[in-house]
Amino acid sequence: MDLIIHHYQGAKDIVKEDIIALVGKKKVTGEDKLTIIKDVSPKEIAILSFRLQSAIHLGVLLGKDKFSGTVEDSLSKIEKKFDQKTLDLFLKDANSFGVRTVKDGEVSIPSPDVSSSVGEWFFNQSKKELDVKLKNPDLPILAIITDSELVISLDVIGFSLSKRPYKIALHSGSINGVIAYTIARLSGMTKDSLIVDPFCGGGTIPIEVATYKEETSSFPYENKFTGFRIPILKSSFEEVSKQILDKELSKEISVFGFDNMLKVIKGAQKNAKLSGVFTSITLSKVDIDWVDSKFEQGEVDLIITNPPQISNRNGNQKQITKVYDDLFYQGKYLLSKKGVLAVLLIHSDEAIEMASKHGFKVFQTIPVQSGGQKYDLIKFKQK
């Protein structure tokens, strides 16, 4: 079986590195938003479903081709190279199917129309009398459509992995878990890095970093993955789930998150408890002006943060510029000589100006997009 992984644009190399770390060296191919792993076992599918923090969706690949502007034309091309052998492995235990569509890009066709076309086509392709069942079907079909690709797969998750179950206490301006993990990896973190987020909000970045360091899952208590309901995958999903729940964490704290509001930190702590990595993180109420009091000079390897953003509508430019001034002042003291200060920004001019004031320079800018919001992850180092 081959596995298709849907991820954020720009995360392809991270996804490949994570795959090798989790299931060993595999033949990996794909586009900028889609990665294919060849010849995976049910156990490997389960491991990647629970552990691949950079993934948004995963599915057993049945067929794909260039998206030519109409779903019907693309499906006719997919039909010529459809993986009927893999489908037959799942068909023997199935009496129903349902189609879920995910769009990623400038695709004008409504999702229900895509699902309808794919459903009609799949019914004929399956060569078996299957009932249509939108909720908990035996065969959950996932159609992924991007600017350039149409993919038909067997959905092993059932929902977007960006919706982390630990995010109960929400925070305005927060980013989802997949974006948080992606920017942390793009920032250059390693298992040994001492990492600080001085504007942690709901705790998403520290939680994702700690999950990576502890080699556990963002879904430690999850039992709703569709893989649990598919006979050929069920035992592997149960085995991997048990291994994650039984895993003992190191409790060596090298991840720190701070915020200046007690209510916000209480929410972050609640999220961290639900994530299973609470004992691996320090989350506390500390104003940006006092972060340096928590560490020795040059002790920190990485500062990774999604700070308050400048809003033209709210007219907060002067206030946020002061925040950036404080951030780089603190970074100058906290970071080691080779340390990196990675900041997720919508508007970057003010931050770059404050960085230069405190002896930092930009050495990499990486575009990041979450939904319709475009960011830049800007990596600074000392001059």
Image (tube, rainbow, N blue to C red):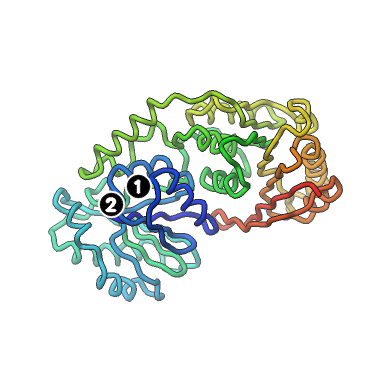
Q: Are marks 1 and 2 in contact (CB under 8 Å)?
A: yes
Residue 118 image position (x, y, % from top left): 29, 64
Instruction: Residue 92: give its label.
Output: none
**Vertical order, 153 against 163 (above or below):** below
**Closer-to-camera residue (275/95):** 275
**Vertical order, 63 against 315 (above or below):** below
**Identity, as a three-letter code, of the amino acid under mark 1:** Gly
- Name the residue: 34% across, 54% down: 3
Q: What whole-number distance in Å separates the C-alpha atoms at marks 1 and 2?
A: 7 Å
Residue 243 image position (x, y, % from top left): 35, 30
Crowd tier of the residue under label 2, counting other residues whose Cα lies within 10 Å: few below 14, some 14–19, many 20 or above: many
Instruction: Residue 158: give its label.
Output: 1
**Closer-to-camera residue (31/220):** 31
Tag 2's secondary structure? strand
- Name the residue: 53% across, 35% down: 213
The quadrant of the picture occupied by the N terminus is bottom left
**Identity, as a three-letter code, of the amino acid under mark 2:** Pro
**Vertical order, 62 against 309 (above or below):** below
Residue 204 image position (x, y, % from top left): 57, 38
Give the mark nearer the N terminus: 1 vs 2: 2
- Name the residue: 47% across, 44% down: 53
- Name the residue: 64% across, 31% down: 256
Crowd tier of the residue under label 1, counting other residues whose Cα lies within 10 Å: few below 14, some 14–19, many 20 or above: some
The answer to which image quadrant residue 230 occupies is: top left
Tag 1's secondary structure? loop
For this view, does 120 lie left or right of residue 180?
left
The answer to which image quadrant residue 327 occupies is: top right
Which residue position holds label 2? 140
Residue 278 image position (x, y, % from top left): 54, 26
The answer to which image quadrant residue 70 occupies is: bottom left
